[in-house]
Image (cartoon, rainbow, N blue to C red):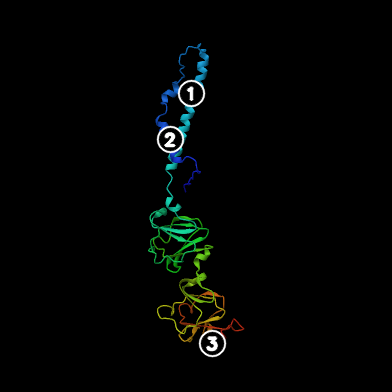
């Protein structure tokens, strides 16, 4: 990666030095003259100096001409290297702290700035499936997702990282900033205090619904048989059921029939078979003395 060189305040810019250098080269002494140049002293009325003094005075001038030519050459070479560096103006335009998306490679083209305290989705901004490159100008991990509400495939960007997307080129539809890379793969933090939250993807990702109330029947095609993970931030036990009106049961090979699926207060879980995508109602109950049983769910 090429290093970006910043010039100190008040100092002449690199470009101005380079222009002066090029101008000096165009007016420099021809190469042949460097080999034969000597000092010519004008004739004055004073007594002439000895010849050996004239020869001695010519040496410093020859050396200075040669040294000056070498300096001009070195500056010209430096200028040619600096002007060959790729421009990073687009990435530098991303204010700190922000996660910035670009619709061109290498931070070029149109851009969208997502501030640190912004929403956890870019849906509706006109940027769905447009991002090609990204600059994470924050101290947190950047997380971008293929689906809305932190769902689908995940790609992570380290703090201060920039570059072209590898997995989600023109597929990003939501994002968040997280304290660690691992936190990009969960979404439980969206569940508010006092809420029972259900999610459409494992690990608290995807669509979410939070409530402090009982529900005798989930809406078909929306939440019925679509729950994949749960976070219980209430002070009660959450009891989930296979059918509406807090009924039904699950059968498991080699296991007793389960009439309810229980999530204790403060717990999170990603559902597994046979409970995954098979819940249609829930209710909240005062915890039983024995948290290992589901008696409170059936009373």
Image vertical order of residue 285 relative to residue 114, above or below: below
List x then y, in percent, for residue 126: 37, 63
Mark 3: secondary structure: helix
Query: Which is more toward the observer, 181 or 253?
Result: 181
Residue 62 is tagged as: 1
> Residue 20's image quarter?
top left
Q: Earlier in the sequence, mark 1 or mark 3?
A: 1
Within 10 Å of the Cα at label 1, are there few (<14), some (14-19), or many (20+) other Cα atoms? some
Outermost residue to the right: 289
Q: Nearer the viewer, residue 200 or 213?
A: 213
In front: label 1 or label 3:
1
Q: Position of residue 206 (x, y in %)?
A: 45, 71
Mark found first going from the N terminus, 3 or 2 = 2
Q: Reply above or below: 136 against 56.
A: below
Q: Residues within 10 Å of mark 3 (few under 14, many from 20)?
A: few
The residue that appears at 52% across and 15% down in the rendered structure is: 53
Q: Which residue is labeled 2 in the image?
A: 20
x and y percentages locating residue 150 in the rendered image: 46, 68
Q: Are marks 3 and 2 in contact (CB under 8 Å)?
A: no
Q: Considering only vertical position in the picture, is 40 above or below 28?
A: above
Count of labels shown? 3
Measured Cα–Cα span from mark 1 to mark 2: 22 Å
> In the drawing, does residue 299 fall left or right of residue 133?
right
Q: Which residue is most to the bottom?
A: 299
**Label 1 secondary element:** helix
Q: Quadrant of residue 285?
A: bottom right
Mark 3 or mark 2, whichever is nearer to me: 2
Residue in the picture at 46% in, 36% down = 75
Would you name the residue on which mark 3 appears? 298
Q: Secondary structure at mark 2?
A: helix
Q: Going 51% across and 23% down the picture, which residue do you hit?
A: 60
72 is higher (above) or lower (below) than 41? below
């Amino acid at each position: 990666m090429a290093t970006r060189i910043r010039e100190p305040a008040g100092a002449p810019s690199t470009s101005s030095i380079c222009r002066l250098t090029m101008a000096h080269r165009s007016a420099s002494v021809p190469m042949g003259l460097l080999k034969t140049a000597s000092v010519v002293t004008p004739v004055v009325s004073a007594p002439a100096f000895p010849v050996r003094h004239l020869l001695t005075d010519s040496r410093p001038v020859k050396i200075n001409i040669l040294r000056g030519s070498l300096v001009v050459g070195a500056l010209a070479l430096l200028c040619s290297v600096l002007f060959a560096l790729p421009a990073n103006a687009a990435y530098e335009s991303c204010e700190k702290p922000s996660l910035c998306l670009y619709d061109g490679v290498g931070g070029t083209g149109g851009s969208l700035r997502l501030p640190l305290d912004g929403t956890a989705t870019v849906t509706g901004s006109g940027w769905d499936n447009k991002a090609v490159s990204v600059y994470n100008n924050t101290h947190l991990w950047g997380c971008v997702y293929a689906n809305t509400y932190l769902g689908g495939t995940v790609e992570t960007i380290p703090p201060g990282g920039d570059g072209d997307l590898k997995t989600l080129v023109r597929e990003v539809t939501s994002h968040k900033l997280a304290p660690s890379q691992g936190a990009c793969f969960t979404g439980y933090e969206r569940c508010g205090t006092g809420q029972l939250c259900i999610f459409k993807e494992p690990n608290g990702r995807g669509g979410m619904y939070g409530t402090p109330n009982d529900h005798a029947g989930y809406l078909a095609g929306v939440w019925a048989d679509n729950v994949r993970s749960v976070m219980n931030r209430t002070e009660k036990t959450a009891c989930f059921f296979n059918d509406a009106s807090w009924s039904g049961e699950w059968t498991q090979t080699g296991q007793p029939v389960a009439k309810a699926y229980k999530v204790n207060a403060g717990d999170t879980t990603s559902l597994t078979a046979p409970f995954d995508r098979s819940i249609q109602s829930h209710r909240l109950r005062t915890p039983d003395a024995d948290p290992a049983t589901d008696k409170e769910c059936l009373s």
